[in-house]
C-alpha cells in the first residue's frame, strides 16, 4: 500500500498532495481544537462510500487507530512525563476519541501553552524549512491551487541557500505572479545553471537521492537542482513555442547520468501533462 503507482493519476490513491482551499493559511495554529474543525472531520469519517471507493476512508481509520496505539505505547514508556505528539489535522480528533477513555493518559491541548511569539518562530525556523515550504508551493502541484504569495516573498528574502536554488525559487515566484516574461525567466534559469554543480540537491533534501522522479507533492520533486532548472527552462521555451528547444532539453535530461531507467520513464510520463500542460 505504501508503494506509489508508476505514474500518479488524479483522483487515485497516492495522488499528488495539494490543498485546493486556502484553509492551510487562513486558519490558525489551533483550528483543529475548535468545534468546526472537529465537525469537519466527523462528516468526512461518516461519509461511507460503496465498494472499493471507500478504500481511502477505511485506510484512514486504520492508520489513525494504529497511530493511537503507537501513542499509547509511547505514553506507557514515558509514564509521569509530558510527551509532545505532532500529528496531521485530519487524524487528531479521531486519535483523541480513541485515547480519551484511557485512564493512564491525560490529553493536553497545545493551545493551553499559548501561541508562539514571532521571535520564537524566527529563532526555530531553519533553512531546510524555508527550502521545503518554497519547493512545495512554487514547484509542486500546489502552485496551481492557491499560494500565499506574500509569505513566499518573505521566505525568499530570508532564504540563505546556494545561489542556484535561490535563483530558481525567486524566478519561479516571479513567473507564477506574472512579474517577468518567459525570456527573462530563461535568462535567470540559465544564470543559475552556470553556478550549480551536478547532482546538487535542494537544502531540505540533505543530499539524499531517491529512485523516483516524483515525490508525493511534485511530479519532478525527486531530481537535482540542475535537472529542475532544465525542466523549468523547457516550460518557458514551450510558452514561446520553441518546440525544438523543448525537445532538446527533454533529450538532454534523459541522457544525464542521474537518470536511471525508472526516472527516464517517469519524466516521459509526466512531461506532457505536468510540464507542458501546466505551462
Image (cartoon, grey):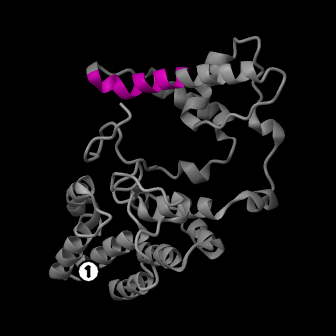
Q: Which residue is mark 1?
A: 237
Looking at the picture, does residue 241 appear above or below residue 105?
below
Q: Residue at 66%, 72% (x, y): give it.
A: 158
Q: Quadrant of the N terminus?
A: top left
- The answer to whether residue 232 is seen in the rendering is yes
Residue at 43 percent of width and 87 percent of height = 191
Looking at the image, the residue that sits furthest to the left is 244
Element marked by disc 1? helix
Q: Left or right of 244: which side holds 5? A: right
Whether residue 148 is visible, yes or no, is: no
Q: Nearer the viewer, residue 138 or 146?
A: 138
- In the rendered image, residue 32 lying in the magenta stretch gets the answer no
Residue 249 horizontal/vertical position (percent) = 24, 76
The correct choice, above or below, for 8 with respect to 272 in the image is above
For image coordinates 42% across by 86% down, the residue present is 194
Decide which of 103, 71 is in the foreground and name it: 71
Amino acid at each position: 500500500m505504501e508503494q506509489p503507482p508508476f505514474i500518479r493519476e488524479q483522483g487515485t490513491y497516492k495522488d499528488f498532495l495539494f490543498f485546493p482551499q486556502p484553509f492551510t493559511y487562513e486558519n490558525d495554529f489551533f483550528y483543529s481544537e475548535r468545534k468546526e474543525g472537529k465537525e469537519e472531520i466527523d462528516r468526512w469519517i461518516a461519509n461511507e462510500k460503496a465498494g472499493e471507493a471507500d478504500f481511502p476512508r477505511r485506510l484512514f481509520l486504520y492508520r489513525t487507530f494504529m497511530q493511537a496505539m503507537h501513542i499509547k505505547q509511547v505514553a506507557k514508556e514515558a509514564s509521569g512525563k509530558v510527551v509532545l505528539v505532532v500529528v496531521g489535522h485530519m487524524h487528531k480528533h479521531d486519535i483523541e476519541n480513541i485515547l480519551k477513555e484511557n485512564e493512564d493518559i491525560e490529553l493536553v491541548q497545545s493551545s493551553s501553552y499559548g501561541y508562539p511569539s514571532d521571535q520564537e518562530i524566527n529563532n526555530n525556523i531553519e533553512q531546510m524549512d524555508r527550502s521545503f515550504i518554497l519547493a512545495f508551493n512554487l514547484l509542486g502541484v500546489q502552485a496551481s491551487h492557491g499560494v500565499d504569495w506574500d509569505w513566499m516573498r518573505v521566505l525568499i528574502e530570508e532564504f540563505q541557500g546556494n545561489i542556484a536554488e535561490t535563483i530558481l525559487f525567486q524566478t519561479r515566484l516571479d513567473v507564477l505572479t506574472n512579474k517577468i516574461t518567459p525570456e527573462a525567466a530563461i535568462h535567470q534559469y540559465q544564470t543559475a545553471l552556470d553556478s550549480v554543480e551536478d547532482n546538487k540537491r535542494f537544502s531540505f533534501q540533505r543530499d539524499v537521492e531517491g529512485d523516483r522522479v516524483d515525490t508525493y507533492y511534485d511530479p519532478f520533486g525527486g531530481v537535482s537542482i540542475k535537472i529542475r532548472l532544465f525542466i523549468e527552462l523547457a516550460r518557458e521555451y514551450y510558452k514561446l513555442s520553441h518546440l525544438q528547444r523543448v525537445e532538446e532539453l527533454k533529450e538532454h535530461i534523459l541522457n544525464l547520468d542521474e537518470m536511471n531507467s525508472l526516472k527516464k520513464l517517469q519524466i516521459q510520463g509526466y512531461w506532457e501533462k505536468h510540464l507542458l500542460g501546466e505551462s
